[in-house]
Image (cartoon, helix red, strand yellow):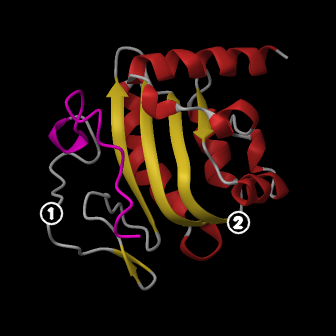
Amino acid sequence: MHTIEPYYNWRHLYIASEDPQSPMYGYFNSEVEFTDRIFDHIIHPQWDNFGCETLFLKILFVDYSSGYAIIEFLGEWNDAVHNDIMRLKRDIIDEMIPLGIDKFILIGENILNFHADITDYYEEWLDDVPQGWMAFIGLREHVVDELSDYGLDQYFILGGQLDHLDWRTKKPELLFKKLQEIVSRRLDF
């Protein structure tokens, strides 16, 4: 797991730790020291620790004028034991919404497992972005199944084309436009 890095080809466009409006402003990532782990596996030092035991993230890009954020995840999303959604909602999302961010592109290809619990924070998140949305890209099939089994798929745009979207070949604004198209088509039904 220590070789799985967050996507870095947009660093010339945006770095969350250098953005005074970002909840990760001032966060320091070591280039050489491996300090975080998921269970007994060390992880690459570029992932940001936001207080969850087994889930890490990287805010890859934020566009305040268009109102969207792209966030990549690594690890086990565990609401049942660690209440990861509460920590994500309170410490990251709640800091972004007042700045006009109401569309969230969540990259989940490195979410290895998902364990659901109550839906309160998901409901609150959706209520907080009445004109926005949350979309997962690249989730593993068993993670989509777990989200669906607990009814959490009603809060996110996920599955289908989003599971196979080649997002790394796009600039952030083109990825956002593509997601807008997909979301608009799905919400129009």
- Magenta residue check for 19: yes
Q: Are marks 2 and 1 in contact (CB under 8 Å)?
A: no
- The quarter of the image holding the C terminus is top right
In the figure, 125 relative to 76: above or below? above
Q: Amino acid at mark 2?
A: Asp
Q: Amino acid at mark 1?
A: Ser
Q: Main secondary structure of the magenta part?
A: loop
Identify the residue shown where x is 74% and y is 60%: 142
**What is the spatial separation of the Cα atoms under label 2 and label 1, in whole angstroms?**
33 Å
State the SS at label 1: loop
Single out the mark in the foreground, 2 or 1.
1
Q: Quadrant of residue 40?
A: bottom left
User: Which residue lies under the disc numbered 2?
Assistant: 117
Identify the residue shown where x is 67% and y is 21%: 183
Q: Which residues are magenta?
A: 1-20
Identify the residue shown where x is 49% and y is 23%: 175
For disc 1, the neighbor class at 10 Å (few under 14, some 14 to 19, many from 20) is few
x and y, in percent, of residue 173 in the image:
41, 17
Q: Is residue 134 left or right of residue 116?
A: left
User: Which residue lies under the disc numbered 1?
Assistant: 30
x and y, in percent, of residue 125 in the image:
58, 41
- The quarter of the image holding the N terminus is bottom left
